[in-house]
Amino acid sequence: MTNKIVVGICGASGSIYGIRLLKALLSQPREVHLIISEAGKLVMAHELGLKESSSFEQFLKSDGVRFHEGARLIQHAPDNLFAESASGSFKHQGMVIAPCSMKTLAAVASGFATNLMERTADVCLKEKRPLVLVPREAPLNKIHMQNMIKACEAGAIIVPPSPAFYFHPESINDLVDFIVARILDQLNIGHNLVGEWGTD
Ligand SMILES: Cc1cc2nc3c(=O)[nH]c(=O)nc-3n(C[C@H](O)[C@H](O)[C@H](O)COP(=O)(O)O)c2cc1C
């Protein structure tokens, strides 16, 4: 069983979802292949203060991400179509795009892959590997909703970033971690972010 996973971060609002997901994944012995789109970098800089000059690993550490000694983070340029995940021969546990923009959702739904993020997602669907999309927009138009249905029918799992409130969240991190927990559940990856309902 491989311990490799691919994470994509798009230029939709909510880069924090991708960061909290990385935090959870890298706290375990795991190889994480990360793709941040060009728009994703801009939005992350705006929302979370990521500086162009600072290394992403340094940024994660300053944000409280603690790397397991067996964890590895490999970042790929979004235009690098030669990266491993662009090929179906690269075996991994699945891909999460969090947050996923309506533009990348549209690309996935229509099989129109022009960059590494879209290509990797396309490969996941053709290889029947888990592909979890966390699409962020409000309100949604008919095209957005149709694209979610198309992606879902092709095998993608749609996890909208809409947290529940029955667990009495006290912070933004609590709200975000609720969604990260749902994402990890879909990939059968253990976590202790939010307890199972009814087990307290
Ligand atoms: C501050 C900011 C917030 C944005 N939020 C969203 C959003 O929530 N959802 C979305 O679909 N696009 C959003 N966009 C637009 C995307 O960044 C844009 O469509 C981009 O082309 C997406 O490219 P990507 O999918 O390659 O990351 C936002 C843009 C900016 C600058």
Image: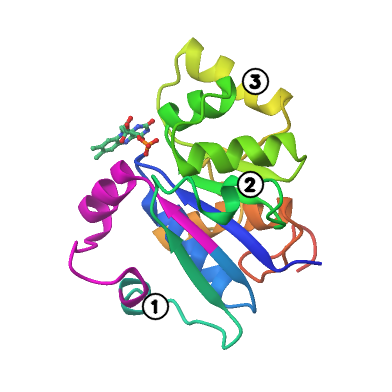
Q: Quadrant of the N terminus?
A: bottom right
In contact (CB < 8 Å): disc 1 and disc 3: no
Q: Is residue 83 magenta?
A: no
Q: Position of residue 23 (x, y in %)?
A: 50, 70
The image quadrant that residue 139 belongs to is top left
Distance from the alpha carbon under mark 1 to that under mark 2 = 33 Å
Residue 34 included in the magenta stretch of the image: yes
The magenta-colored residue range is 33-58
Q: Which residue is mark 1?
A: 64
The residue under the point 56% across, 51% down is: 179
Determine the secondary structure under disc 1.
Answer: loop
The residue carrying mark 3 is: 149
- Lateral position of residue 48 relative to residue 83, left or right: left
Coordinates of residue 154 in the picture (x, y in percent): 71, 26
Q: What's the amino acid at mark 3? A: Ile
The residue lying toward the viewer, choosing from 80 and 67, is: 80
